[in-house]
Image (cartoon, rainbow, N blue to C red):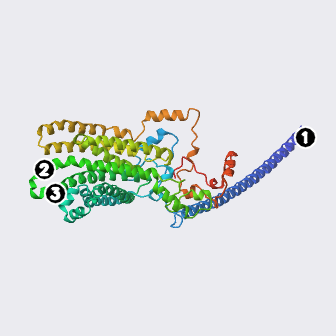
Amino acid sequence: FNFAGNLVNKTAGTVVKTANATVGVAAKTANATVGVAAKTAKGTVDVAAKTANVAAGAAAKTAAAAAKQAMSLFTSEDGRPLSSGFVTFTNLEATNSARQTIHYPQPFTMEVMDAPAPDDVFWHNVALDHKQLQVGKLISMSLTVALCLFWTIPMSFISTLSSVEGLRATIPWIDELLDKYPWLEPVLAQLAPLLLVAAHEALKIILQFCSTFEGPVSGATVTASVFAKLSVFTIIQTFFVSALSGGLVSQFSNILQDTTMIIDLLATSLPSQSTYFIQIMLVDTAVGLSVELLRFSAIGHAIARSLVPPNLTQEERESMSIFLRPFACPRDFEHADLMSITVLYFVVYFVYATIAPITSVFMFICFLLVGAAYRHQFVYIYPTKPDSGGGLYIQFMRLVPVCMLIGELTIVGFLALKKNAIASALMFPLLIITILFTMYIGQQHFKMTKFLPARECMDTDAKNNALGPMDLEFMRGKYVKPELREKKVYPRNEPLERKLRRSENGEAGLENQHPYNYDNTTIL
């Protein structure tokens, strides 16, 4: 029993020692493992930190290089940042919403307007700020007002030529000249309409120059501005100055004898001025349409263009050089010029349709010839480019009620000069109705022409996307400066047969290849 007890004690001591030794080995192993894990984790953190620092340094260098490259575009040599851009939308509803929304709380900071046609953009005026635009408009308005005041002098002189009798009574040497050479009298009578047409052409060029100070972003904007100015000049100078000065000059000798006769003389001479305006309309229609149909200017330009290089290839021969155009590159139609003359026709019609009814007959003949001639020119001659998106027609419709009021007021004044109080009083209801009608259509009708209704926008978008999203690939790269949009390769002497064969095979020409791609929904 004692032996067994001793053996058990020894065995227990051995087991305890063995357990202690095992625990010690396990503890040392655990400590060694924790130490190795801690060292490994610390090494991993150090490696990750070093990697992050390297990545951050590389990113910083890349960002700095990108910023340096971007800033190189804004230097004086390569370009400058602009505050304007073009946005292409994928649906009409978003377009109209953007046009009618106030995008910034401060006035004159952000303005949204319709984009002109891509080929009609004046890129040097796109990024003008509000101050530059206001100063330009002030200069343009000042020049226009000064021109309107000083233009009265030549217009008054031209209108005096319409009355040979007045010239003979006023200027003695003209009386002696006409007595010596009687054949000059009909020539002098027809000289006034010709000079008036020539003065109108000169006035158009001057007003186009004045309109350039307004910072227009497109040729359509210039056309609209010139049309407004020409219409005002036509009403004030061509009609009022010519009618009044011509009537007074024709009775100048009688007015000198009795100044109290001026009212009666105006009442009798105003209807006689209808002959002068009929001459103006006939001369302008005959001369203008003859030059338009025979194309003297286009023929002269084409002959001069054939003598001016470059003329090596067919494409070069069919392109414009300097300001000379070949037949294959006709100029755009000048809508402002034609419509401003139409304003004069309407004023003359509204004034003299009752005073001198024969004016209506000649007016019908002029409109018939003008309509037939320009219909032919639009079909066969002029390029099918957009004008002002119908803006000129809206301005013209704003002027028609004004022409009606001018005609009615002139008739009231004419009847008053005739000392017919009853007839003058009966004209006032017509004046009031015309004014009320003008105010009525000015409330909402013209506003409806600026924006497309939301319902029509949604219906149009639904039709365009009925078979899937509408393909707007044709808008890609349109509103990009021509220098960046296309790259011309010289010499451009590829034969026409090869171009047709290449287009049939779906191959792109060198002139259409460009390393940059533009998104049609990007703000440029």
User: Where does residue 107 sit, x and y in percent of width and height?
Assistant: 36, 51
x 68%, y 46%: residue: 506
Residue 83 in sight here: no
Q: Nearer the viewer, mark 1 or mark 2?
A: 2
Quadrant including the N terminus:
top right
Q: Nearer the viewer, mark 1 or mark 3?
A: 3
Total numbered labels: 3
x 55%, y 35%: residue: 465
- Residue to which mark 3 is pinned: 252
Hey, what amino acid is under mark 3? Answer: Phe
CB within 8 Å, label 1 to label 3? no
Label placed on residue 153: none
Q: Earlier in the sequence, mark 2 or mark 3?
A: 3
Q: Quadrant of residue 72?
A: bottom right
Q: Earlier in the sequence, mark 1 or mark 2?
A: 1
- Secondary structure beneath disc 2? helix
Q: Nearer the viewer, residue 488 or 231?
A: 231
- Residue to which mark 2 is pinned: 263
- Secondary structure beneath disc 3? helix
Q: Nearer the viewer, residue 332 or 87?
A: 332
- Residue to which mark 1 is pinned: 3
Hey, what amino acid is under mark 2? Answer: Ile
User: Where does residue 312 sit, x and y in percent of width and height?
Assistant: 62, 62
Q: Residues within 10 Å of mark 3 (few under 14, many from 20)?
A: many
Q: Nearer the viewer, residue 278 or 235?
A: 278
Q: Is residue 406 above or below residue 218?
A: above
Q: Earlier in the sequence, mark 1 or mark 3?
A: 1
- Secondary structure beneath disc 1? helix
Q: Residues within 10 Å of mark 1 (few under 14, many from 20)?
A: few
As drawn, is 51 to the left or to the right of 262?
right
User: Where does residue 483 sit, x and y in percent of width and height?
Assistant: 56, 58
As drawn, is 219 to the left or to the right of 398?
right
